[in-house]
Amino acid sequence: MKITFLGHAGALVEADGVKLVCDPWFSEGGAFLSGWHQLPDNSACAPLVREATHVYVSHDHQDHFDADVLDALDPSVTLLMPDYPLPTWKRLVRSLRGPAPVLLGDQEVFRAGPLRLRLIHSPTPRHQDSALVIEDTVTGQVVVNLNDCQVDRDQLRTIRRLHPRIDVVLAQFSGATWFPFAYSFPAAEQVEAAQRKKVNSMRRWTRYMQALEPRSAVAFAGPPALLDPDLAAHFFAESSVFTTPPELLAWLRRTHPDLAERTVAPLPGDTLDVSTGRSTADPAIREGFDWEDLAPYIADYARRRAPAIAEVVARYPEPRHDLYDGFAAHFKALFAAGERLCRAVDAVAAFDVRGPGGGFWLVDFRSLEVREGTGPESDPHDYRFTLSSRYLPEILAGGMSWEEFFFSFRFSAWRPGIGAYNEELMSVLRCSDPDDLAVYLRRTAQGGVRPAGTFTLETPRGTYRVSDVCPHLGARLGPGDYDPELDAVVCPQHGWRFALPDGACANGRARLDVSPAGPAAVAATPADVSAALAPDTATHTQPHTPTDAPGRPRERQAHQ
């Protein structure tokens, strides 16, 4: 196999006439209200998509799901996507004007010539994301494209069980969220939180590579460029969460020098020969781009993209009517669709909508009421979001979710402190369509993709039974996640810390279920690679087994 990198999370994988393009993103308008742009500019690689025989799209985020690219695909192309249950995903897929997608379930296999493509869904219903395992059945070579998908240790074990030898793993290494820089925290707290987030992203990337042990570890899927002058400061600020490849490589040389030796940080146009592990750099892209000297490149890039950014913003004119009634109806519909979750928010969220048709509005999740207020100084509230009124009609009409809007970074926020994160509030806003919220609640009530369980944790202060599901975003926990220095369980996905013996969280308004199970034991040690791959002592209601056995995979193939 040969891989040509297309920028961000894009890649072209070739084998014996099959040309599989993954997550092509080339829109000049970028993504998320033109808040994100490809870094560096990858437009020179766009013609390669026209050669594709197959295209894989991992999820609905606009830096992966470029509707303009997908609509322009030749009808002969086989388009592969995950079969997600949320109604908005199904509507998005139906809206495409190109080839009808082939929708694949978790662990389902699709055959493309010599390539066996295994799709892996995100392990938690809180995320709609997927990864792709690409196996060349002729050469035995294996490429694992994790992109943004935060797989858990169960899924890593499954991949290794099916593929003991892995050649290449591609995975996101940089942060890509609005926390902490969108919040009005004190500057020192913002910087400290951002540094923790950067390190945690690099640790998560490293855990994937240690668990899968590829010959070539690829730093992939980010960071984006923030080209709008109103947003650019977020990239270069000390509170930035956007890790660059030089930062990752420097950190790896200090902490994991062996892994640093086999880490590849490609630019658009670079290639990787999977059989030899040899990468070839594209000299053209390097004539004007250097990660170590980004400021002048970003300034020129922003000048070139300014017309496209202005065009995107112009699609959202200032409203000519009052928006309060539609805003109130929007949240009342969410209350009706998910009363249990909405009451669990247990807070008042203020929305300071500035501009024509706006106002200061309070969403009371305790009483399930929406009311007009007068301002942040006079109306008590627990959380606050400030935004321009021009973007609100699109959210209320269902054309954009609150999460997609937040990814644009075109807002500011307030909460009482770093540790006041409210997962229930963010879950409601993530599922900002009532139908999505209802499906999401049914899935979480059923345990989602993975059944919940507990594990036994032996520590110097005692033995405990601990829930194996992080209350933040549902990541799987195990004994190896205990940090004896902190005397806490630390989630491997986002670094949330849960203190013993009560499970109190240092990062947000959450608590991990912990109960005493016995006397003190010998101090535990941090997880190593073998702990990440070996069975742990967690107890589940049923084991996780791939839907197709390794020896006899259920395969689907396009009918030409």
Image (cartoon, grey):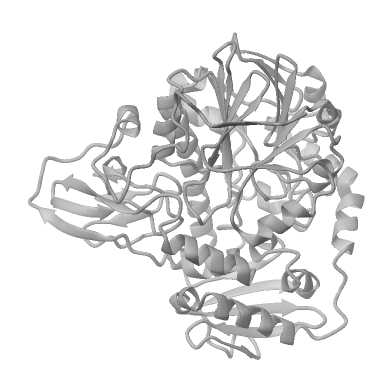
Q: Residue 9 occupies which quadrant of the picture?
A: top right
Is residue 451 depicted above or below 17 in this figure?
below
Q: Quadrant of the N terminus?
A: top right
Question: With 363 as the anchor, is 390 left or right in this view?
Answer: right
Kindly give the residue lying farthest to the front in the view shown: 559
Residue 470 visible somewhere in the drawing: yes
Q: Nearer the viewer, residue 317 or 298?
A: 317
Q: Nearer the viewer, residue 220 or 65?
A: 65
Q: Residue at x 51, y 37 (%)?
A: 107
Determine the residue positioned at 69% across, 62% down: 405
Which of the two residues, 543 or 464, is positioned nearer the viewer here? 543
Image position, residue 153 (x, y; %): 39, 38
Q: Is residue 406 above or below residue 218?
A: below
Q: Quadrant of the C terminus?
A: top right
Residue ID at (60%, 80%): 350
Instruction: State which quadrant residue 64 falls in.
Output: top right
Residue placed most toward the observer, 525 or 1: 1
Residue at the top extreme of this rendering:
276
Whether residue 426 appears in this view of the structure is no
Whole-percent x and y of residue 162? 44, 25
| Horizontal arrangement in the rendering, residue 153 relative to residue 121 (left or right) | left
Number of numbered discs present? 0
Above or below, comparing residue 354 to residue 488 in the picture: below
Tell me where residue 299 sits by quadrant: top right
Seen at 44% across and 75% down, the residue is 344
Instruction: Give residue 199's position: percent from left, percent from top.
Output: 48, 41
Above or below: residue 411 compared with residue 291: below
> Residue 511: image x %, image y %?
33, 63
